[in-house]
Image: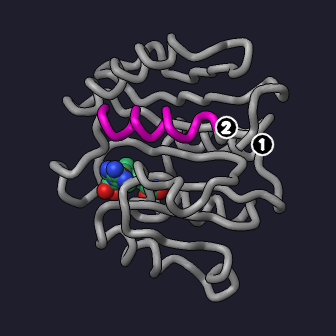
Amino acid sequence: MKKRSIITRLAHELIKLYVTKDDVVIDATMGHGFDTIFLAGIAKKVYAFDIQESALFSTKEKINPLQQNHIQLIHDSHEHILNYVTSFKGVIFNLGYLPHGDKTITTNKHTTLKTIDSILPYIPYQGFISIVVYPGHEAGYEESLALNDYLKTIDTNTYHILRVDLPYQNNKPPYILMIIREKEDVHTM
Ligand code: SAM
């Protein structure tokens, strides 16, 4: 199998710093399920969302019988995460379109920001939102600008925002954003 990119692998390493076997986590962009399966290996329960049914088929094929009770695949937009689950350690996004799929079906700045804004108050102390951003395509570039504007408005006493990128690569390479809640004493849902 082709090795995943350094950015994806680093995103996983960062996520591993925060997730334990007692945690519930969410994959907001299931795609082919590689991130979902990764999360299932380190967490207690994974809820994974995608708007494309083909993503659910592709992911289902990768789930082994031992993992079945620990993964819930949901055919819905991540905008509706809170309709399914309100208590979780972290949420991960791998933005863009389904590789080898329909490139016109991609995450977009409106739904991505709406979702992040709605789940942020539910992130517990030492919980996180991890986002892999792909500014190399048009919708992804728009999304990256919108995310940058949005993140500037976040209270940095409560949340730390980390960015890992490849500053010397050409053609707008992907990068990681991670929002980590560092303060305990704000309201917990
Ligand atoms: N994490 C995936 C993996 O490991 O294979 C890759 C994700 S792929 C880059 C992005 C996925 O986001 C696509 O499958 C797309 O259908 C999905 N997507 C786009 N908009 C969405 C939304 N509003 N809610 C949930 N999934 C969405």
Residue in the image at 62% along x and 64% along y? 46
What residue sits 23% from the left and 33% below the top? 139
Badge 1 crowding class, 10 Å Cα cut-off, few under 14, some 14 to 19, many 20 or more, is some
- Mark found first going from the N terminus, 1 or 2: 1
Q: Indicate whether 88 appears above or below 118.
A: below
Secondary element at tag 2: strand
The x, y position of residue 34, in whole percent, is 51, 61
- How far is disc 1 from disc 2 in space, using C-alphas? 8 Å
The nearer-to-camera label among 1 and 2 is 2
Disc 1: which residue: 18
> What is the quadrant of residue 154 in the picture?
top right
- What amino acid does circle 2 point to? Phe
The front one of 153 and 70 is 153
Circle on res. 133: none
Height in image: 134 above or below 51?
Answer: above
Q: Main secondary structure of the magenta part?
A: helix
Q: Position of residue 84 (x, y in %)?
A: 54, 63
Q: Are marks 1 and 2 in contact (CB under 8 Å)?
A: yes
Residue 171 at what x, y percent from top left? 29, 22
Q: Is residue 118 magenta?
A: yes
Q: Residue at x 69, y 43 (%)?
A: 15
User: Which region is colored magenta?
Assistant: 109-121
Outermost residue on the bottom side: it is 65
Give the residue displayed 63% in from the left and 88% down from the top: 65
Instruction: Tell whether position 18 is magenta.
Output: no
Residue position for label 2:
128
Label 1 residue SS: loop
The spot of residue 11 in percent (x, y) is: 60, 39
Query: Is 5 left, or right, of 13 in this rendering?
Result: left
Return the residue nearer the eye: 146 or 30: 146
Badge 1 amino acid: Tyr
The residue nearer to you, when weighing 14 against 145, is 145
